[in-house]
């Protein structure tokens, strides 16, 4: 059966196609986070910002974490809750979520104390904070919801990679996703908006039965390591790790216990922040 196609954002609003396009059968991203939690922190209460389909939450829930997932897409949250009943999921904005909305029926919504040991923000979700004000708002929320000593683990594109490197910008990329016998074809181009410090993307989708291409645009803030350190300290965090490789989406795949490269020149950037006491 062909899924009900939603056009607000083709991939993120159609979870089954999203998982087909971005498979992670070995739960590499979730295991990557678990390794960093064991290296740099502890605790089992985890908030996943930009939780998507709940795939990572399923792994964490099965390995002893108490998980809450947050995403701005109602379709993603509905899919995640259906496939991971052991976690709680909410539709919320990463810049303004409230403690009461994250309790999922547990605890006292009037209790102002932070309730999470770990907050994760993977697959460049952090970079949907396009402005400095957005970044300030998100980090304030993280500081408020993390217990003292808690970790914020973020994985994203590395702005420094684009200093003199144009390999991701030089050509239009064509890809095909097949779901239930239907081919969904996309053409993607990327370019840098220097004024707003954004990496912009245009993606055009076509599939059998669609007359006109579905054209969608999105963008990510390009952040540099020094900027991230500045924002972290500004909001009461210590930087305990910052590295480009290895990682779940880095050129050098992540493996448990691997040494962390601090060259900071790769395509991906991984940051572990600790909330100060």
Image (tube, rainbow, N blue to C red):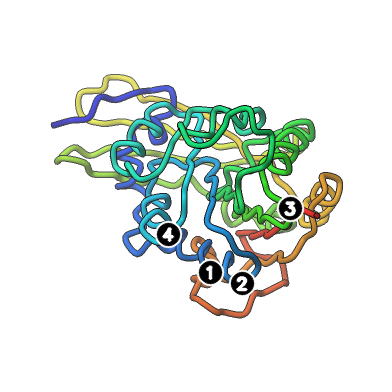
In this view, the residue in front, 243 or 50, is 50
Return the residue nearer the eye: 176 or 249.
Answer: 249
As displayed, is residue 256 above or below residue 47?
A: below
Query: What's the CA distance linking mark 2 and mark 4?
Result: 17 Å
Eye-nearest disc, 3 or 1: 3
- What distance separates the C-alpha of mark 3 from that of mark 1? 20 Å
Vertical side of 146 occupied by 79: above or below:
above
Label 3 to label 2: alpha-carbon separation = 17 Å
Q: Is residue 21 left or right of residue 30?
A: left
Circle 3 crowding by C-alpha within 10 Å: few under 14, some 14–19, many from 20: some
Q: Are marks 3 and 4 in contact (CB under 8 Å)?
A: no
Q: Are marks 1 and 2 in contact (CB under 8 Å)?
A: yes
User: Which residue is denoted by mark 3 in the rendering?
Assistant: 148
Residue 190: image quadrant is top right
Label 3 secondary element: strand
Residue that numbered label 1 is attached to: 35
Give the farthest residue toward the top: 211
Disc 2 designates what residue? 39
**Marks 3/4: CA–CA distance:** 21 Å
Residue 39, horizontal then vertical, whole percent? 61, 72
The N terminus, quarter of image: top left
Is residue 196 shown left or right of residue 250? right
Q: Secondary structure at mark 4?
A: loop
Q: Earlier in the sequence, mark 3 or mark 2?
A: 2
Q: Earlier in the sequence, mark 2 or mark 4?
A: 2
Label 4 – label 1 distance at C-alpha:
14 Å
Choose mark 2 or mark 4, whichever is in front: 4
Q: Give the tally of numbered discs.
A: 4
**Which residue has dot 4 on it?**
64
| 3 or 1: tag closer to the N-terminus | 1
């Amino acid at each position: 059966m062909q899924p009900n196609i939603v056009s607000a954002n083709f991939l993120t609003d159609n979870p089954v196609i999203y998982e087909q396009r971005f498979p992670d059968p070995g739960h590499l991203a979730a295991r990557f986070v678990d390794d960093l939690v064991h290296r740099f922190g502890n605790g089992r209460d985890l908030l996943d910002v930009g939780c998507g389909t709940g795939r990572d939450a399923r792994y964490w829930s099965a390995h002893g974490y108490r998980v809450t997932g947050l995403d701005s897409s109602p379709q993603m949250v509905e899919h995640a809750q259906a496939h991971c009943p052991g976690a709680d999921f909410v539709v919320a904005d990463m810049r303004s979520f409230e403690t009461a909305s994250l309790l999922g029926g547990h605890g006292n919504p009037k209790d102002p104390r932070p309730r999470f040991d770990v907050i994760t923000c993977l697959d460049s979700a952090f970079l949907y904070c396009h402005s400095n004000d957005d970044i300030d708002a998100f980090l304030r929320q993280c500081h408020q919801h993390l217990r003292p000593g808690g970790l914020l683990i973020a994985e994203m594109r590395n702005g420094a990679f684009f200093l003199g490197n144009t390999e991701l910008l030089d050509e239009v990329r064509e890809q095909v996703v097949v779901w239930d016998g239907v081919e969904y074809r996309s053409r993607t181009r990327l370019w840098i908006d220097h004024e707003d410090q954004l990496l912009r993307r245009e993606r055009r989708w076509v599939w059998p039965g669609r007359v006109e291409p579905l054209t969608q645009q999105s963008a990510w803030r390009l952040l540099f390591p020094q900027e991230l350190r500045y924002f972290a300290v500004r909001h009461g965090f210590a930087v305990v790790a910052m590295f480009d490789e290895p990682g779940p989406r880095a050129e050098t795949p992540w493996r448990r216990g691997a040494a962390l490269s601090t060259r900071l020149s790769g395509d991906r950037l991984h940051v572990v922040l600790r909330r100060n006491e």
